[in-house]
Amino acid sequence: MIREEDINGRILYQDDAHKFIWLGADPENKKGVVQTNQFLIIDRGRGILLDPGGIHLFARVVSVASRYINIDNIDTIIFSHQDPDVSSGIALWLGATKARVYIPSLWIRFLPHFGIVDENRIKGIEEEESTLKLGSGAELVFIPTHFLHSAGHYSLYDSGSKTLFSSDIGAAVFERDQYLFVEDFDEHLTIMEPFHKRYMTANIVCRKWVEYVSRFDIDLIAPQHGALFNGETVKRFLQWFETLECGIDNLDQIYSK
């Protein structure tokens, strides 16, 4: 269960130079509105936001993030893909910070629809180095996640906290009470599997992604929706996702109705 104090976020990893922070549950999340997770990395006083969310969440995310860092010290914002629940607040974040914004290059030309006129601070992920080196020695590694579900999509591995920010991979749609960590994997499947079967493109892509991320030492998988995987559930999730039949694998079922 989400604790009341978790509305103000929780530090998931911390050492002398590096933190990985979940920015809390939205107490006003309404039924029918997709729940989202926002994350903040602080490395030697430098702030990096991951998928800070839509317009309606901007004030809450600023408020919670400000408990951990001065907003002026957020110098990097990373958007994993183009969905409005991920990036529709981008114009507000560009106005509130001096941050450089990373987003898959495929989606840059769509940003004017979010009110972006000046693209000088926008960086296409494919046009930059695949790794961002941080002051602590930690690295942020962009991981291609195309077609899972977006044609231009990236996960991010934080070597400092050994966290894989998986964006929509691992997402679940809460039907009742929200919880932060997956404890009963089989029960969690009931709210995770339908999303993946519909939104992920095909098993061949799932297998490629699992093969790619398995080279990293992962303690935590943090998706953009739903609960987080740690301990034994990290392994269970990767094993499940690697064998998942989804998307076009199920075309015969779709067109037989």
Image: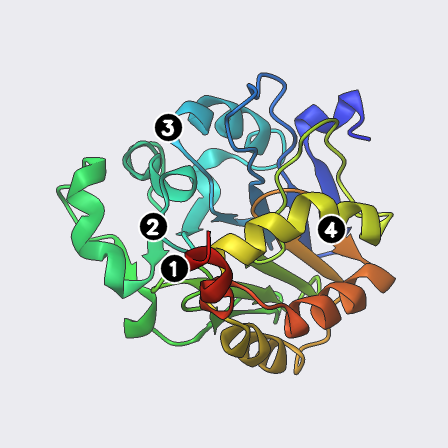
Horizontal side of residue 78 vs 163, given as left or right: left
Q: Which residue is mark 1?
A: 150
Q: Is residue 134 above or below residue 177?
A: below
> Dots 3 and 2: beta carbons under 8 Å?
no
Q: Which residue is mark 3?
A: 55
Q: Which residue is mark 4?
A: 189
> Dots 2 and 1: beta carbons under 8 Å?
yes
Residue at image point 56% right, 57% down:
197
The mark lying in front, picked from 3 and 2, is 2
Q: Which residue is mark 2?
A: 82
The mark lying in front, picked from 4 and 1, is 4
Instruction: Tell me which amino acid carries mark 4.
Output: Leu
Residue 167 in the image, given as x and y percentages of width and height: 53, 54
Residue at image point 63% right, 68% down:
244
Instruction: Tell me which amino acid carries mark 2.
Output: Gln
Q: Secondary structure at mark 3?
A: helix
